[in-house]
Structure formats: C-alpha cells, structure tokens
Image: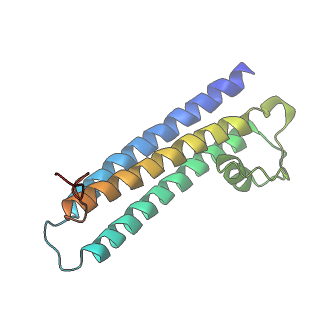
Amino acid sequence: MMLQFLVGTLVSVINIGIHALVTVVAVTVARSAVPRHTKRPRLHLMSLMITIAVVLKIAHMIEILMWAATYHIVHAATADADMLYFAFVNYTTLGYGDITPVPEWRLIGPLTAMNGVLLFGWSAAILFEVLLRTLDHLGLTEKPGADLPGT
C-alpha cells in the first residue's frame, strides 16, 4: 500500500510541476497578448481565452500521459488493458469501471482522480483570473458599486 502512495505522490508532484510551468506560460502569454487599445476587445478576449484553454487542455493531456506511462510501468491493470484510456477515465473521475486495477494497485485510480480534480480546479482558476484581468485591462469591467446612489 505504501508503494502505491509513493508512486501516486511522485506522479502527482510531477503533474503539479507541469501545471505550474503551464500556469507561468499562460500568465505570460495573457499579459503580453493584451494591448491597451484594440478595435475589437471582445474578439481579442475570446481568442485569448481560447488560446489559454487549449494550452491548459494540452497540459492535462500530458499529465494523463504521465499517469498512463506509470500504469504501464507498474502493471496497474491487466496486460491487455488500454492504459491511456484507463488513465483518462481515472483522471477525469469518469469512472466507467470497465477496466479495473489489479488488486495490488487498486489505490492508483483514486490517487489519479485526486490529482485530476485538483488540476482541473487549478485550470478553472487560471481561466477565471485571465478573464478578469483581461476584462479589467481592456476597460470592459465596471468598478464595484459604481452604479450605487451616492457614489
């Protein structure tokens, strides 16, 4: 059981590192891609959000590949199982159950799911932050309470 936790923790830490790197790239791209004045701010915002979402999706796919490689190395499921599919199902918490881990690796699925939930939440936070910062930078947001009487 301890080996499962160690392997799961190691892969999770590697994936967190990948996500941290992608976060830095996403924030850098977002900051450099937003001109102060543009004729089509909403189109610009949409293209930036799509770009950031695609970059995050690629990061998630790389992270899933890390899990699939780990499953293959430790023989987490039977030899005829599709490890990439198994990793996707676990990472996304879909949990079809058509592939199950071998008994000595039964905790690897929940560990993968914990990692996926954490990183999906992180991605949502990145997208939201980029959206807010870009809206503010383009002047498309109003100050809180700006339309309240007496302000």
In the orientation shown, which residue stands out farthest toward the top? 2
In the orientation shown, which residue stands out farthest toward the front? 149
Q: Residue at x 44, y 38 (%)?
A: 17
Does residue 120 appear left or right of residue 113 in this picture?
left
In what quadrant of the picture does the N terminus appear? top right
Name the spot of residue 24 as percent of width and height, x first.
32, 47
Name the spot of residue 80 as percent of width and height, x first.
84, 53
In the orientation shown, which residue stands out farthest toward the bottom? 39
**25, above or below 139, in the image:** above
> Which of the 4 image quarters holds residue 141?
bottom left
Is 16 in front, or is 66? 16
Does residue 11 appear left or right of residue 128 in this picture?
right
Name the spot of residue 53 as percent of width and height, x first.
44, 61
Q: Residue at x 20, y 59 (%)?
A: 137
Query: What is the basis of the colouring in this image?
Result: rainbow
Q: Residue at x 39, y 54 (%)?
A: 128
Is 130 in front, or is 148? 148
- For the image, the number of numbered tags is 0
Does residue 53 appear left or right of residue 61 in this picture?
left
**53, above or below 22, in the image:** below
Q: Residue at x 77, y 55 (%)?
A: 82
**38, above or below 142, in the image:** below
In the orientation shown, which residue stands out farthest toward the left? 37
Is 68 in front, or is 46? 46
Name the spot of residue 81 as percent of width and height, x first.
81, 52
> Which of the 4 image quarters holds residue 19?
top left
